Image (cartoon, rainbow, N blue to C red):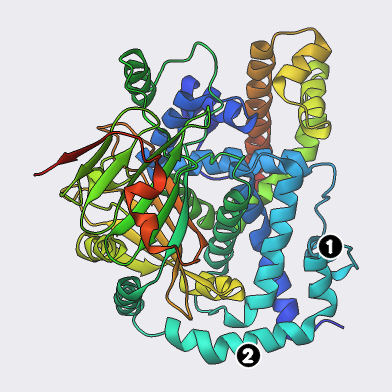
Amino acid sequence: MSEFHAEDLPPEMESLVSRHFDGELGHEEHHCLQKWINASSENAKIYVDFAILHDRLLKANTQVAGNLDDRIEDSFEPFLASRGNQKRLSWAIGALSSIAALLLISLFVVPMLQGTPALAAETQLERLIEVARKSSDRTYLITSLEFRGNKRHGAKWNRNEVLDERNRRRGKVQAPVDGALLHVRGESSYVLIRRFENGDEFITGSDGKTSWSVPPKGRIRVSDNVQRFRSEMPGNQHAIPFITLQDDLKQIRAAYNIQWLDPELGIEEARSGQHCLVAKKKSAEHRGPKYVEIWFDLETGTIIEMLLDKLPQAKGGPKTVLLELIGKSEMPEEFFQHTTHHDSNRRVSYQSE
Amino acid sequence: MIDKQTETAMRHWTLAQPAVSAFIASQVHDVRQRDDLLQEVAVAILENYNRFDDSLPFKSWAIGIARNQTRNYFRSHKNKPLLFDSETVENLATAFAAVSPQSIEPMDFLNECVGELNNKARQLCDLRYEKDLKPAAIAKKLGMTANSVSKGLQRVRASLKQCIEQKTIAGGAQ
């Protein structure tokens, strides 16, 4: 055991740690636990010692400590034995294909990952910016990955919930970003389709010359300011609106430290043809999420996923948002005009700014 | 016949496995999923071992792979919300990577210490860890409140830690 002693742990934290391992913590309690873990490396060590005890208790009936060789065999038994699972079977019988894959990786991928990691990551980001500038139509699914928390009844509301409730009471219910579809073309054309629980759609977009908003009911609004209806886009308030991907990446280049997810892990990911750049915000002076992941196809430079974590919460909205590329079909020209998305008898209001 | 490289990888892995396993278990509470992930990590380590730079700590490398596999797990299981945010996972990865074999060895006293628990504590421990029941289910089984089961489990863990520490000190003094 390490130098820490359980009695050094404040009782309320010991209770939190213990209940965490029993899967009993609510949202706010998990926040407290995280805050405590992140407060010092000593706290993280205390947590780790409890985690090792918990893990050993879980395995107490299946693992018996013996000499090193016995433990080696025990540890690898699942892989050395024949298994029905295709992945594990491939380990037992697929040595040739693994070697071939490793050869391919070492020939084509590794040279791109070697060198000064920071420089390579910056270079790769430049390439993504260039590809984004030239890219054709893309469709992204937006998912709000809320922080885990089995919220309990009666637990305190967090700020987002208070804001949501306030909006509900004022009749200003916003269409949810979670599950929304974002169609993007070139540098500034987009259509964002958000859907309410009752199936009604709230659609906003731009054809690059005007922007527009098509609510389920009421007038359609059209503006000559192409940024007019972007406020609902996740990240928009943080200067990373997703719509103009090229601009987003430039913003990341300026305000974030860029690195590969991990050189070794990059190779691991290469098996599925995907790589990841991680961007961490340089300082709190810059707006935007603290942490961004950009998953992309190494060969084409196409961004497959973007994860924005720890979005500022001052104006509500999700804390973590994932954009996944789900289609690259070319959309008809008129798709980016409002007329495609509503009946011709709807009233349209034009605004000039 | 296992070749030299695989044998070295296995030896490294055996020493790193307790920390890697606990790292995964801290984020994935489902035991079967945890086991599956641990196996995925082991396979990835074996398949990529020739890329490991042996001048660097193996455990950090292994935990890096575990972190990646866990991240992928949550991506493909969107109904399983994340337990920890990126900053916390990063801090935990650092802390788990720093776990030394010397700090794992005392865990060999665990079985002995479990055997020394009183009947009630032993029952709680068995239901939680052998039967993989959560406090609410244990409470129903034993006619207790979930809160008292949680408190009881907390005491069980604290007394096991204390017992392991005492036996380690006693062992060191001999």
Please give left or right for residue A65 compared with residue A267 in the image: right
Label for residue A103? Answer: 2
Quarter the C terminus of chain A occupies: top left
Tell me: residue B77, above or below residue B166.
Answer: below
Badge 2: chain ID: A
Q: Residue at x 34, y 70 (%)?
A: A132
Type of amino acid under label 1 = Asn
Horizontal and vertical percent for residue A185? 35, 64
Say if residue A41 shows up in the picture: yes
Q: Residue at x 79, y 74 (%)?
A: A91
Type of amino acid under label 2 = Leu
Say if residue B116 shows up in the picture: no
Kindly report the distance in space between the C-alpha atoms of the residues bearing marks 1 and 2. 25 Å
Please give left or right for residue A259 compared with residue A11 in the image: left
Q: Which residue is mark 1?
A: A85
Horizontal and vertical percent for residue A108? 52, 89
Quarter the N terminus of chain A occupies: top right
> In what element is the residue under mark 2?
helix
Pick the residue in front: A133 or B94: A133
Label for residue B35? Answer: none
Horizontal and vertical percent for residue B73? 62, 52
